[in-house]
Image (cartoon, rainbow, N blue to C red):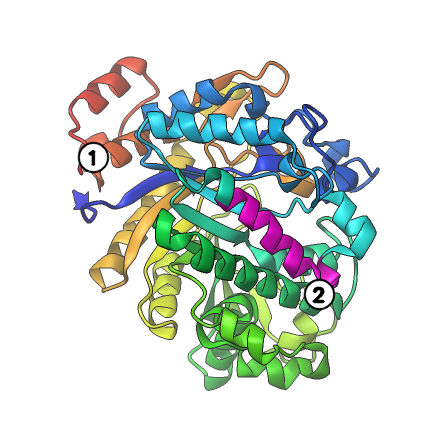
Amino acid sequence: MKQFPDNFLWGAATAAYQIEGAWATDGRGPSIWDAFSHTPGKTHEGDTGDVACDHYHRIEEDVALMRKLGLKCYRFSVSWSRILPQGRGEVNEKGIAFYNKLINTLVANDIQPWVTLFHWDLPLALQMEMDGLLNPKIADEFAHYGRLCFERFGDRVKNWITLNEPWCSAFLGHGNGYFAPGRVSDTEPYIAAHNLLRAHAYIVDVYRREFQPAQEGQIGITNNCDWREPLTDSAEDKAAAERALEFFLGWFADPVYFGDYPASMRDRVGDRLPQFSEKDRALLKGSSDFFGLNHYTTMMAAQPKEEISGMGDIKGNGGLSQDQQVALSDDPSWEKTDMGWNIVPWGCRKLLEWIDKRYGHPPIYITENGCAMPGEDDKNVALNDLTRRDFLKGYLEACHEAIDNGVDLRGYMTWSLLDNFEWALGYSRRFGLHWVDYKTGERAAKISAKWYATVCKGNAIDPEFECLVNSSDAYTKACGKITRSA
């Protein structure tokens, strides 16, 4: 048995646009993702988040699923335009009421709410009126929005995440146009990222000055990163792997911990990389109470034999490859998910150890980790998801090894509680512990959910339950034998 530390936080994560639906209900304003998904050709088969999982009308049912899993926390995002339809100005009290109901239901079921303020769904009005993330003044709008959330929800919410994966908003939204708002540029990603970092710092400043002393919560940022393993032991490939991590994670984490971008980015991007003012640098440095990490896969990294141009393969999250000059590849022996992402649990351990060393042993929470597997449109295939169970087991064992090696990992939240709208891929990929019938709204627990429940309730990976089958009797018997750790 692999026992996790006392008070280790077990959870699951979602995002507003991916599950809520009710896109034009009770006064909600449109976001850039409403506009993007309603634009022909932008998403798989024209899929939208108009209904999604209809979580807006199924709070009690979904919290009951969480309770059955034994979750200690639930990470969700607030739809900015649901509570501020124009992004600023008049407050939509019906939107506030929805989140109050969700938060109160979670608290009543002894599940900690972990609230993400921004998970990519910028109010459309702010995009149209002020050019969204490209306008430096957007940081002030973020801070005003954050203040509203702290005022209305902070008496019960003690864990805040300012931004989810700003790399995606910057590069996928403003680099290759794969995500909303669908812009293509080799300069705009750096501007958008810069303003997102400033927005994070401004939100944290508001929280720490005006709310944290009384509310006694914590606030941080969640970044995404895949591990980069050197293709060979050569100094050139090792340097390429390190550079790839700096351009991926260091781009956003270095300013938060050190006050500026990595030197490798300054050297290679030049004038296209903005400068922080002294005020912004001071606000940024030390602006996270924990290190939030979303991690999914690993790739090999090497010094390219010839110069790379363009933005790289989206599957590999290459980013602005012409700036990094890193060649990414797979080990042919690695198994892959339905996203084409490599299944490499030891990459998770190595990344956790890299973060621990580079950023001075911060408390870390994995705020997303999970997989989409093929064939899960078929309910029977989906419910018998032994491959997802094995994926989770492998990555959790890697987390356990990292803890044994001294990493201060304090929690793990799997992606995702439910199958949902997978952004540009629409409903063609399923990451959930629970299968969702998008026509009827039915939820059904997969084997992975039943296995994960034994982990959450036992605070351990227990070999006795590794062969848990898709049987309600077996599930009930297994969970009945577990005493949930404090």
Q: Name the residue located 60 percent from the left edge and 48 percent from the top edge.
A: 145
Picture coordinates of residue 96 (x, y %)?
A: 57, 32
Name the disc covering residue 136, or none: 2
- Up-down: is 444 above or below 179? above
Q: Element under label 1?
A: helix
Q: Name the residue located 38 percent from the left edge and 59 percent from the top edge.
A: 290
Instruction: Please state which of residues 260 and 349 is positioned toward the viewer in this rendering.
Output: 260
Instruction: Please state which of residues 219 and 265 is positioned toward the viewer in this rendering.
Output: 219
Residues at marks 1 and 2, CA–CA distance in whole angstroms: 47 Å
**Which mark's residue is nearer the viewer, 1 or 2?**
2
Q: Name the residue located 69 percent from the left edge and 24 percent from the top edge.
A: 25
Q: Quadrant of residue 184?
A: bottom right
Dot 1 or dot 2: first in sequence order is 2
Instruction: Please state which of residues 414 and 397 is positioned toward the viewer in this rendering.
Output: 414
Q: Are marks 1 and 2 in contact (CB under 8 Å)?
A: no
Name the disc covering residue 458, or none: 1
Q: Does residue 177 appear in the picture of this structure?
A: yes
